[in-house]
Image (cartoon, helix red, strand yellow):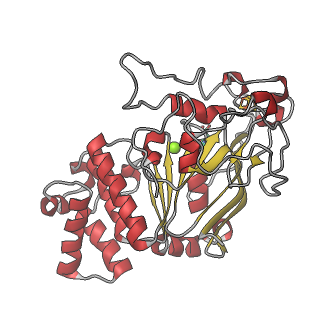
Amino acid sequence: MALLEVDDLSVTFTRRGQRPVRAVDGVSFSVDAGEVVGLVGESGCGKSVTSLAIMGLLPRQPGLRIGGKAVFDGTDLLQLDDRSRRDIRGRDVAMVFQDPLSSLNPVIPIGLQVTEVLTRHRGMKGAEAGREAARLLDRVGIPDPKRRLKEYPHQLSGGMRQRALIAMAVACKPRLLIADEPTTALDVTIQAQILELLKELVRDSGTALVMITHDLGVVAGLCDTINVLYAGRVVETARRRPLFRQPRHPYTVGLLGSVPRLDAGRGERLNPIPGSVRDVLPWPDGCAFAPRCSRRVDECVGEPPEMVLTHDGRGYRCVNPAPLPGVTPAADVRATAPTAAEPGPVPAQAVPDDPPPAPGLGPAPHEEEQP
Ligand SMILES: Nc1ncnc2c1ncn2[C@@H]1O[C@H](COP(=O)(O)OP(=O)(O)O)[C@@H](O)[C@H]1O
Ligand code: SF4
Ligand SMILES: [Mg+2]
């Protein structure tokens, strides 16, 4: 069993007098120790709500309903009482938030906040903890770490606060780390350093990492498996390489088309996805992406498309997926639709292990070849 198994997670917000918002709608994914799993999608697709629900950190408000399971090492995190959840959160599971100010204590110097983590979780004391704290700040690219350790969060820039927070998360060597857009506010050089640090954490400590981002370029060099979210549902799931080389869901194709590429010809334009995330069809009425989709066909509306699973563990929620090379769209399997929970027969055009890149869709800029 995976270290974290998220199964059919759903989160609904209901405000009086308004229609319920189903921010997360049956999301399932799993993460093994030492694995990096990406959750990717445009703003508002439910990435943060997914992670906050798993961590038990959604603000308690009337009308909040959470369903499904998030089983960490045999324990369903969604069923824990506050105390057990706090224990697990400190010891085994850590999160880096998009907004560092909300996670740092404004009246305690950065150094004390980092050394406290080292004392509590790694048993370090005094000078040893101080040295390790300085080393960690240095590792996340904070200049003059000894001086910075004495400063308060408001004395650091936003980017530095984010890096201090990442240092704290790395300091406790958690078994599971959920990082929600951890590098979005940082410039590209620091971003690369942070991604390298996260890779090292996964490699050296066997940490399972859930990487949340709107930027496919970020996950390209880091994630083993990628889940693409749209309007609260996973619309495509695949290992990194097949996803970049041969995306099947038109939304994933669109996301890849909007990533700047180093090998793009002069004057070649990016291809943003038309419309905005607000142009959604409610899932019960059909595919939520239909209003923006260039591959839309009649079958796309009426019923929500089910997840189609292929033999190599890929899945896409689409009745007219982007074709594979050499397969005419007419031969493409449509709506054979086994459910995610009950994989049915493998569609005839199951994805080969290592398909050639789709025309016009090479690997994203930072993609590395896997052995
Ligand atoms: N506390 C809340 N009350 C009502 N709706 C919310 C709340 N938090 C998030 N949402 C809605 O849930 C959806 C998903 O939000 P979020 O997970 O933050 O998106 P992402 O992180 O992918 O940008 C959005 O439509 C957002 O407006
Ligand atoms: S189901 Fe239809 S509308 Fe939805 S992504 Fe596939 S082709 Fe496009
Ligand atoms: Mg978010």
| Number of numbered discs overlaid on the protein picture | 0
Residue 328: image location, x then y, percent = 75, 29
Rendered view: 291 above or below 29: above
**Image position of 223 (left or right of 199):** right
Residue 341: image location, x then y, percent = 79, 57
Residue at the limit of the structure toward the front, as seen here: 326
128 or 63, which is in the foreground? 128
Q: Residue at x 23, y 72 (%)?
A: 132
Q: Quick check: which quadrant has ligand 1?
A: top right
Q: Quadrant of the N terminus?
A: bottom right
Residue 358 lies in what quarter of the image?
A: top right
Rendered view: 325 above or below 310: above
The reply to whether residue 58 is in sight is no
Q: Residue at x 52, y 33 (%)?
A: 256
The reply to whether residue 299 is in sight is yes
**Image position of 101 (left or right of 7):** left
Residue 324: image location, x then y, percent = 67, 36
Rendered view: 196 above or below 287: below
Q: Residue at x 44, y 50 (%)?
A: 369
Residue 173 lies in what quarter of the image?
A: bottom left
**Image position of 22 (left or right of 201):** right
Residue 228: image location, x then y, percent = 60, 43
327 or 95, which is in the foreground? 327
52 or 221, which is in the foreground? 221
